[in-house]
Each structure stands twice: as C-alpha cells, then as structure tokens.
Amino acid sequence: MSDIITLKENREFRRAYSRGKSYVSPDLVTYIIKNNNNNLRIGITTGKKVGKAVERNRAKRIIRAAYCDICGRLLPGYDIVFVARTKTLFRKSTDILRSMQKHFKDAGILKEE
C-alpha cells in the first residue's frame, strides 16, 4: 500500500467514537466504523495522559509502524481510529501489531490468507 490515508477532521473522529465499534487491549484502543468510500482511512490519537509531546509522538510512530505491517491484509472501506494508552510507550511495534491483529480479527476485517 502506498500512502496512508488519514482522518483529519474532528467530526470524523467523533463519528468513530460515537458510532464505531471499539476494541480494547492494555496497550491500544481501536475504533472501527464502515465508511462510504472504498478506502481504508486511519487516525491516531494520544491523550495528555500518555506523556509530553515527545512521548506522544513516539507512541504515534509505534502505532503507525505496526499499522504499516498489517494494512495490506485489511478489507477496504473502513475508518479506523487508534487511541494510544500509557502502556503503548513501553511496547515495541511488534507487540502493538499483535494487539491490532486481535482487534481486526474480532472486527472481521482481517483478510484470511
């Protein structure tokens, strides 16, 4: 997959929070909702609880790296919002990838190989 299409507008995030299905693990929360186009779009948020700006950016990078490894195996047509948790900082992207795989499998959007 070439470029990652990101959610940018507040209303897109709010839509995922209010109407999307959430999947929770100790290091990551994932909201998944069907969208009207055939694209896979993601948004990554980190709250102030995660840490200062440097830590929050690191958490986003870890999540983005894990997502890049799995994005080719997902069904198109979904908006996905990842919310970093305080434990995200202390995990490697491979650990986050495992959490993502479980969330996507539970949601039924992971392609079978």
Image (tube, rainbow, N blue to C red):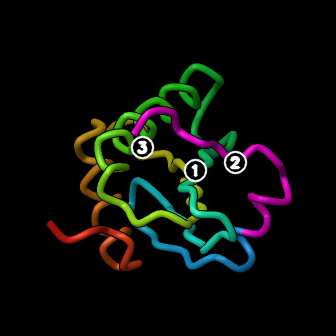
Which residue does the numbered mark 3 point to in the structure image? 88
Instruction: Give the distance between the C-alpha atoms of the residues marked 3 and 2, in whole angstroms.
Output: 21 Å
Question: Does the rendering let one see residue 46?
Answer: no
**Identity of the amino acid at label 1?**
Ile
Could you tell me if the residues under marks 3 and 2 are in contact, i.e. CB atoms within 8 Å?
no
Q: Nearer the viewer, residue 60 or 15?
A: 15
Mark nearer the N terminus (3 vs 2): 2
Highlighted range, magenta: 1-15
Query: Please, what secondary structure does the residue beneath circle 1 have?
Result: strand
Q: Position of residue 112 (x, y in %)?
A: 20, 71
Q: Residue at x 85, y 59 (%)?
A: 11
Which residue does the numbered mark 2 point to in the structure image? 7
Give the answer, above or below, for where 51 lies relative to 13: above
- Specify whether 40 is left or right of 93: right
Q: Nearer the viewer, residue 16 or 4?
A: 4
Q: Residue at x 58, y 19 (%)?
A: 54
Which residue does the numbered mark 1 point to in the structure image? 42
The quarter of the rendered structure image containing the C terminus is bottom left
Query: Please, what secondary structure does the residue beneath circle 2 have?
Result: loop
**Identity of the amino acid at label 3?**
Thr
User: Does the magenta-highlighted stretch encompass residue 74?
Assistant: no
- Specify whether 106 is left or right of 4: left
- Alpha-carbon neighbours of circle 1 within 10 Å: few (<14), some, or many (≥20)? many
User: Does the magenta-highlighted stretch encompass residue 8?
Assistant: yes
Instruction: Give the distance between the C-alpha atoms of the residues marked 3 and 1, in whole angstroms.
Output: 17 Å
Could you tell me if the residues under marks 1 and 2 are in contact, i.e. CB atoms within 8 Å?
yes
Mark nearer the N terminus (3 vs 1): 1
